[in-house]
Amino acid sequence: MASSNPFSDPLRFERQVRPCALVIFGANGDLTKRKLVPSLYRLAFERRLPTGFAIVGNSRTEMSDEEFREKMRASVRQFLEESPFDEDVWRDFSRGLHYVSGDLRDPGCYQRLAEKLGEIERAQLTGGNVLFYLSTQPSHYEAVVEGLGGAGLQRSEAGGWRRLVVEKPFGHDLDSSRLLDHAVHKVFPEVDVYRIDHYLGK
């Protein structure tokens, strides 16, 4: 009888992930610099990312794509664990790094993000697949979800999937977590919502 443990499946890490874009809200924060981008680089080093994979960082800080790439390069070199820094791998990986600045409560931020995702979809053939990662202060979660919904970013015209990852803490008590759940479900169905601890995600 086959084991019910998904981590015992020998094909689990051999399956090809579909091309997609990952949007990181809070891309100028410690979590992105210390954990998220170094871990994504490691996946690239191990050839576990699909061709066409892209990352779009967002924060209020004004930055060009190239400035964001240089900042993430320094972070990967400083915080990378258990994998060497390979210049050729970084060159390929960094081509998929993009940046959109903007305040999370400004609808214009999400319009610019939609435009950037459209460019990436056409250039890197992501099929409209996007993962939105909330690496912000918990007080911003609801504003981001509302902004994504207001810009229609929870749906893909190309038929791709759209998913939301929410870092802990998800509320500070039962009542607040239920209120946040309600706000999230107004935009994303439960099947597309992932509540995680980044150490488990890593």
Image (tube, grey):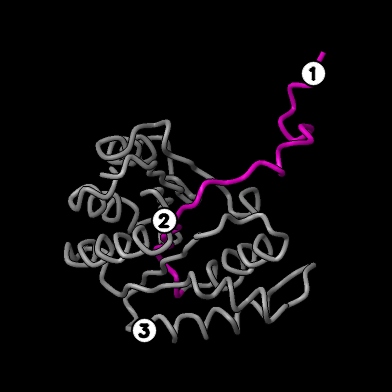
Bounds of the magenta segment? 1-28
Q: Is residue 57 above or below residue 18?
A: below
Q: Is residue 140 above or below residue 5?
A: below
Q: Identify the residue at horizontal 25%, vertical 44% (top origin).
A: 157
> In the shown orientation, is residue 177 left or right of residue 145?
right
Q: Nearer the viewer, residue 6 or 54?
A: 54
Residue marked by disc 3:
63
* Image quadrant where residue 133 sits: bottom left
Compare marks 1 and 2 and give the one earlier in the sequence: 1
How far apart are the two marked residues, 2 and 3, measured between alpha carbons? 25 Å
Q: Secondary structure at mark 1?
A: loop
Compare marks 1 and 3 and give the one earlier in the sequence: 1
Look at discs 1 and 2 and give the one toward the viewer. Answer: 2
Magenta residues: mostly which secondary structure? Answer: loop
Mark drawn on residue 107: none
Residue marked by disc 2:
125
Asked whether residue 116 is drawn in magenta, I would say: no
Asked whether residue 5 is drawn in magenta, I would say: yes
Q: Position of residue 39 (x, y in %)?
A: 64, 63
* Image quadrant where residue 60 sits: bottom left
Residue marked by disc 1:
2
Q: Is residue 160 above or below residue 44?
A: above
Amino acid type of the residue that numbered disc 3 sits on in the rendered structure:
Met
